[in-house]
Amino acid sequence: MIFYNHYKNISDYYNRTTDAWIETYRRTQSFRFHQYLEAHDKILESKIFNKKGGVYLDAGCGDFSFSQKICKRNKHIKIVGLTLSEKQIKIAKDKCTSNCTIINQNFESIKYPDNSFDGCFFIESFSHALNKEKVCSEIKRVVKNNGMIYILDLNLDSNAKKDKVYWGWYKIFYFLPIKYKNSLKIFKKYFIINKSSTDLINYRKEFYKKIRKNVNFENCECTFLNSDKKTTYGEYHFMQSTYNLPVVWSEFIMTNNK
């Protein structure tokens, strides 16, 4: 696969499609099945944020909806969101409170001093990274010693590349997921793995089973865009009910160790 100007592709894609994501799923980040979004967010909130407060980095923040909600609910927490999309910044800025900020930056090269943040989280954004080790190195630098790093994202099954339709999905959305074991190998070089939790993953999986009864989820913990209609940005989405998709959703909870 050739990714020409990968991050510009991502920026252009989300500039073009953010309105459609929000219209369909209410937001771009952790977007699926909005009827369960509040419960989903509370699980995330309990895993990511320290009750004592702190300054956190939302790396790949999308339209910043999740972090804005957290900041409104927790005045003692500050969050900085990074996105490549000018469109998402425009959408988010009017809704930002005094304790949340969204800026246009690439998380491979974060323009913040060392030890700026008490923690960092990637919600369905780490798989966009072209150089995942460089991202880990940057996060290690900007997060304080013993700060928490949280990643919720896709890990590719070895069978996925054999599926041309499935792999075509990744070409459209500029995702570059890696195998679970490879993820662990990279993360262990930079952070201390606290645990690989399945609480949120199982929550999603059980819900997906209810609404996708004809899909075998035993070996597939995932969800994909599920409309067969042509969207406002001119691309067809695949019907999830057609495939048993070879991907695993993974959740990593780690501690920075200087």
Image (cartoon, grey):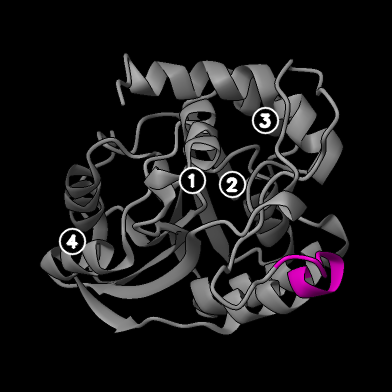
Span shown in magenta: 208-215
Seen from the viewer's position, the closer of residues 33 and 45 is 33
Q: Which residue is mark 1?
A: 80
Of labels 4 and 2, earlier in sequence is 2
> Which residue corresponds to the image point at 49% horizontal and 58% vertical from the top-left?
246
- Whether pointer 3 and pointer 4 mark residues with C-beta atoms closer than 8 Å, the reply is no
Badge nearest the viewer, 3 or 4: 4
CA–CA distance in space, label 4 to label 2: 30 Å
Front residue of this view, candidates 172 and 6: 172
In whole angstroms, how far apart are the C-alphas of marks 1 and 2? 6 Å
Measured as percent of width and height from the top left, residue 247 is found at 49, 59
How far is mark 1 from mark 3, CA to CA? 12 Å
Q: Are marks 1 and 2 in contact (CB under 8 Å)?
A: yes
Query: Of callouts 3 and 4, which one flags the residue occurring earlier in the amino acid sequence?
Result: 3
Residue type pointed to by label 3: Lys
- Circle 1 or circle 4, nearest the eye: 4
Return the residue at label 2. 100
Locate residue 221 relative to residue 197 in the image: left or right: right
Image quarter where the C terminus lies is bottom left
Q: Quadrant of residue 76?
A: bottom right
Horizontal arrangement in the rendering, residue 150 relative to residue 138 (left or right): right
- Res 130 → quadrant: top left
| Residue 187 seen in this snapshot | yes
At x 88%, y 62%, the residue is 35
Q: Which label sits in the foreground, 4 or 2? A: 4
In three-dimensional space, the C-alpha distance between marks 3 and 2, rounded to whole angstroms, equals: 9 Å
Q: Amino acid at mark 2?
A: Cys
Q: Check the image and report above or below for 190 versus 87.
A: below
